[in-house]
Image (spheres, helix red, strand yellow):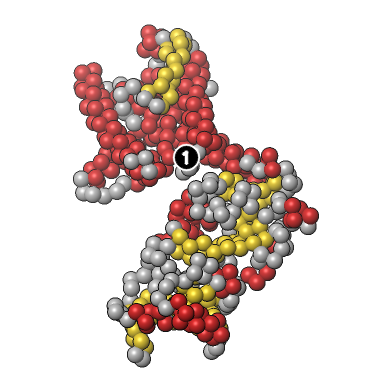
């Protein structure tokens, strides 16, 4: 055990020096309006990346309490291996955060060698690091452990979707999202990445002239090759309705041309109301999405050899979107619906279906979502695993396991980082005090002054840094 905790001493000393210097450097950078990586890292550790729900809150609380217990258990085992008596164990709540500590016999502790004292003080940090490593290993082995009961790699199962979600009218719990804009997705980070890229894609608004027409770049970039008869029918609709917007069941489109870098729509000047009417077309979205695609806003795979160009009797039309809104096509399946279960509930063939086939079977469907993609992405809880058999009570187990392991990693890593700082009443203070005793050219009084200054400086810096983190977190979740 002493050899085991001696490794923890080396790791904890490196962490104390490294994290303390990072915090000091970041605090200096604040005066130059630079955002440091330590604050972003700590914010990520403290927030865990979970949405605010009863299940997630319960997982976070349990993982935090168990991480604290494992931290204090490390101190207790290290003290017992050094022959130091444990007087009592205390549990408390500071504001809203749980805490605990192990009270040792101070006289016996002070009579132990310095390195023995370091083994005891560093044991908590070391145990949190080991717990993180174990959870990371279990997370990497999760697909192997879940393989007998769960299927992965053919879409993302909806494990939870609130009624307030903008996608709740299209998706329900236990549906499987197969693709977004024709791109198959198998991991939750792919879902966030695709929607985030689409939401943040902005154009620099370049313009150019072609004949007598003036064109401006559009942020949509997603077009469809619409045949002439459809456009003629849409013109008749505009003549009937004059300047009234499209009916609820129709979507407004506008003519566009594309080059290698952007897609452009005709720019209408102010006061040209009739020309603006003529430049737009009301079409049925569910029929348009079955047409060939054009424009450069679509995600392409490496084996996609299509040029996204239209034929001579077709025009490239893009949806006329409200600023801040985006357009995505989502293909999904309902493997646990009654109609799909009668067919065997197999997604292996449906996942390779073409766009024209989507929605033609009880297992499959597709829809177009127009709105804020970031809010839509955060409102749905997805899991890369789904049960091999229609045992829906097992559907949430992988999500709970994954979130639990993630919470353990975040809570234990946060405890290790915080306790590595030389702050009042934390392990870093005792580790620094004991380490200074090794420096023989400092007198006892000088060591006390150095400890006092370091403790005060890093306590103030820690309070400022964590206050900024908590404030930005409350803004992110909308509490302020």
Q: Nearer the viewer, residue 282 or 211?
A: 282
For the residue carrying disc 1, how many other residues have a C-alpha within 10 Å: few (<14), some (14-19), or many (20+)? few
Q: Residue pushed farthest bottom?
A: 211
Report the residue at 23% width, 18% height from top.
444
Q: Is residue 225 visible?
A: yes
Q: Is residue 196 visible?
A: no
Residue 288 position, x and y percent, is 56, 74
Compared with 200, 67 (above or below) is above
Q: Circle 1 is placed at which residue position?
A: 52
Residue 307 position, x and y percent, is 54, 80
The residue tagged with tag 1: helix, strand or loop?
loop
Using the rendered view, name the quadrant where residue 216 is placed: bottom left
Q: Nearer the viewer, residue 311 or 442?
A: 311
Report the residue at 40% width, 12% height from top.
109
Report the residue at 37% width, 23% height from top.
94
Residue 42 position, x and y percent, is 38, 40
Image quadrant holding the C terminus, namely top left
Describe residue 14's horizontal placement relative to residue 312 as left or right.
left
Residue 261 position, x and y percent, is 41, 76
């Amino acid at each position: 055990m002493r050899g085991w905790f001696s490794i923890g001493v080396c790791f904890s000393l490196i962490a104390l020096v490294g994290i303390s210097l990072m915090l000091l450097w970041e605090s200096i950078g604040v005066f130059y309006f630079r955002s440091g990586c330590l604050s972003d890292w700590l914010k990520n550790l403290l927030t865990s990346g979970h949405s605010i729900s009863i299940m997630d809150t319960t997982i976070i609380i349990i993982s935090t309490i168990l991480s604290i217990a494992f931290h204090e258990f490390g101190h207790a085992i290290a003290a017992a291996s050094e022959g130091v008596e444990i007087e009592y164990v205390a549990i408390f709540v500071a504001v809203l955060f749980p805490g605990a500590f192990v009270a040792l016999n101070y006289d016996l502790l002070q009579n132990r060698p310095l390195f023995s004292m370091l083994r005891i003080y560093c044991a908590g940090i070391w145990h949190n690091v080991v717990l993180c490593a174990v959870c990371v290993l279990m997370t990497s082995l999760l697909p192997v452990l879940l393989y007998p009961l769960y299927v992965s790699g053919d879409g993302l199962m909806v494990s939870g979707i609130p009624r307030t979600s903008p996608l709740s009218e299209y998706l329900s719990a236990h549906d499987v999202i197969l693709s977004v804009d024709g791109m198959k997705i198998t991991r939750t980070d792919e879902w966030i990445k695709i929607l985030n890229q689409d939401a943040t894609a902005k154009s620099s608004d370049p313009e150019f002239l072609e004949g007598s027409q003036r064109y401006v770049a559009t942020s949509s970039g997603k077009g469809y090759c619409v045949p002439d008869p459809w456009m003629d029918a849409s013109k008749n609709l505009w003549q009937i309705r004059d300047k009234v917007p499209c009916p609820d069941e129709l979507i407004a489109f506008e003519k566009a041309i594309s080059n290698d870098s952007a897609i452009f729509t005709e720019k209408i000047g102010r006061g040209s109301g009739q020309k603006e009417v003529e430049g737009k077309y009301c079409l049925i979205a569910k029929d348009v999405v079955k047409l060939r695609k054009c424009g450069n806003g679509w995600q392409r795979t490496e084996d996609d050899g299509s040029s996204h160009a239209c034929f001579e009797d077709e025009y490239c039309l893009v949806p006329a979107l409200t600023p801040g809104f985006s357009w995505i096509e989502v293909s999904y399946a309902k493997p646990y619906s009654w109609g799909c279960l009668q067919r065997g509930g197999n997604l292996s063939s449906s996942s390779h279906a073409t766009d024209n086939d989507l929605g033609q079977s009880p297992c499959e469907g597709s829809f177009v979502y127009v709105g804020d993609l970031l809010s839509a992405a955060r409102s749905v809880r997805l899991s890369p695993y789904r049960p091999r058999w229609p045992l829906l009570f097992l559907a949430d187990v992988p999500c709970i396991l994954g979130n639990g392991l993630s919470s353990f990693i975040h809570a234990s890593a946060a405890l290790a980082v915080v306790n590595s700082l030389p702050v009042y009443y934390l392990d870093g203070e005792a580790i620094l005090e004991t380490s200074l005793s090794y420096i023989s050219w400092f007198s006892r009084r000088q060591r006390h002054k150095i400890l006092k200054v370091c403790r005060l400086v890093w306590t103030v810096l820690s309070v400022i840094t964590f206050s900024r983190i908590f404030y930005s977190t409350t803004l992110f979740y909308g509490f302020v």
